[in-house]
Amino acid sequence: MEQHWKSAKGLFSAVLGPPLFWLVLFFMVPMGIVWLYSFGENRGLTEIALTGTFSNYLRAFDPLYLKIFVKSVGIAGLTTLICLVIGFPVALAITFAPAKAKTWLLLAVMLPFWTNLLIRTYALIAVLRTEGYVNQSLEWLWNGLDAVVGVLGVGSLGPFQPLELLHNNFAVVLGLVYVHLPFMVLPLYSALDRLDTSLIEASLDLGAGHLRTLLTIVAPLALPGIASGVVITFIPALGSYLTPDLLGGPDSQMIANIIERQFKRANDWPFGAALSFLLMYMTFIAIALQAMLSRRRREPA
Amino acid sequence: MAKRPAPGPLEYLRRWPLQLWLAGVGIFLYAPLVALMVFSFNDSRRNIVWQGFTLKYYEKALNNASLIEAFVNSLTIAAVSTFLSLILGALAALALWRFRFPGKTGFDGALALPIVAPEICLGVAMLVFFAKVLPWPQGLPWPMNLGAIIIAHVSFSFPFVAVVVRARMASFNRELEEAARDLGASEWRTLKDVILPHMTPSLVAGGFLAFTLSLDDFVITFFTSGPDTVTFPVKVYSMVRFSVTPEVNAASTILIVLTVVLTAIALKVQGDPASTAGGHAALDRPKDRP
């Protein structure tokens, strides 16, 4: 039974005090200031007047920025979808793997997740760039093919044209999938692991195929897990800064890059603050949707 | 070798389409990292065609004073912020586990905020905070100059520790505590000899999580670090912006190996590998709560 705080005031304040203090001073206060700034206006170089204006938020709906918001949601959504499609069979295989293999597979999924994000992004740059591993391999194949064609006397294929794999939207989505795949696989696995396998076996025994069982039995039962996997992947993907910054081109900027620009280069803190809180609100909406979905699933049961 | 029986209905791992899928995903996840590590030993500036084995880029990386400094900064920040996060996280978990108090739901919810808030928002908030409210003095001796970054890292790490510790405390048998009290142990003694031992595995998992989060963080550090407080990710970022060099490969390889070693140690201490999925449990929880 939980103890009422009044029965041990000394211990209670010693236990709650430090984390509460830290949370308020080093999280709530900074966030609060940004929130206040989002209603402010620039006065001079460093002064910000809190005028209670909504103009910063209105400016975010300027077509220029609205396009970036829509694009960010699109890229994050596409990333989430690809992660789900790639990750679901992986989670399924892990769930029904023998205990020993399960341990190793989970570890294999988690290890890149522990590896530094910057290093992983850098590794992708090395793979994708014009003189990267993909283009080098393709060039080697191309030259081989060219030689064969030459021997056959049909002519020449011409010089190899490297693929433009880096600094475009493709690279951003690929990079986001690469980084966020573990975020999807782990919640999916924990949802599937809780499933009652006898239901699946019953479905298979009664003659439903694997695909049908998956779609009509497994997927609906695992829906709360799928929803949490989707949200856990979508939120960091939506707010990602590093991947679009390093892998993207001039037209693949996402919300976070615009926010960074307001604070570090454009020096328009109020507008950056408004953008940053719009991103926060979008995050909250995603979480609320997921909570509603999982509550609705629970009620009829 | 005896022929194995056909795979059972749920032995998905033994079906070739799934094996193929897993292999594909494995290549996707690991090939870039393996390539990066292999080519750090390649004796060619152009970094693509294999020219022979060399350690010269490791020598270069290890002689690059600013890279080493950044690396030491990163490890220091991670160690200090892990220590603080463990204390604050364990206390927060204890408060939520032990007491009923007004505003408990609010505190619980607020504690989840740093976990779910986008990194960029936290980074921006820290930038503003240290610019306007608590300007961190310039030119302090090392490691005091890292204070702002450490504070920022603790802010997003300790709620993760709290989640992991709290999940562990849910399995604590409160009768043990009552027994200790009945036998005359003081509040403090009970905490030290009964509750803390039960908490230890989650402290290991939480500490590992906090350390990795801190070592991994780029965005929030990017907004709080100054010119003389560069961390490893920030340094690599500035190097990568210019070009892909074997030196960065070498430095990255060292960090990857460090990560693998740390993971192995955490697993050894932890015993059960699946429980190190604490990071994931922590991410899962705020939204998965009934």
Image (cartoon, coloured by chain):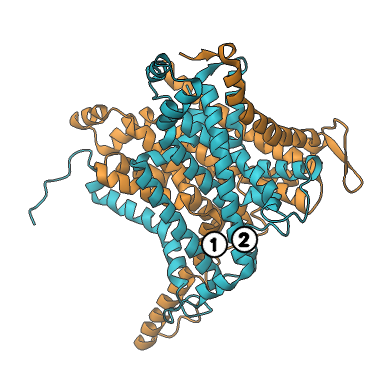
Chain colours: A orange, B cyan
The answer to whether residue B214 is above or below residue A139 is above
Image side of residue B215 versus residue A276, left or right:
left
**Among all residues in the image, which is located at the extreme right?**
A44
Residue under label 1: A122
The answer to whether residue A239 is above or below residue B94 is below
Residue under label 2: B70
Dot 1 falls on which chain? A
Q: Nearer the viewer, residue B63 or A249?
A: B63
Image quarter of residue B185: top left
Mark 1 and mark 2 in contact? Answer it, CB < 8 Å: no
Determine if residue A292 is in view.
no
**Disc 1 versus disc 2: distance between alpha carbons?**
17 Å
* Amino acid at pointer 2: Ala
**Among all residues in the image, which is located at the extreme left?**
B2
The answer to whether residue B102 is above or below residue A161 is above
Q: Residue at 59% of width from left, 12% of height from top?
A: A6
Q: Residue at 42% of width from left, 48% of height from top?
A: A110
Q: Residues within 10 Å of mark 2 (few under 14, many from 20)?
A: many
Q: Nearer the viewer, residue A159 or A218?
A: A218
Q: Nearer the viewer, mark 1 or mark 2?
A: 2
Image side of residue B32 versus residue A242, left or right:
left
Q: Residue at 8% of width from left, 57% of height from top?
A: B1
Q: Nearer the viewer, residue A115 or A75?
A: A115
* Amino acid at pointer 1: Tyr
Residue B93: x, y in percent?
52, 28
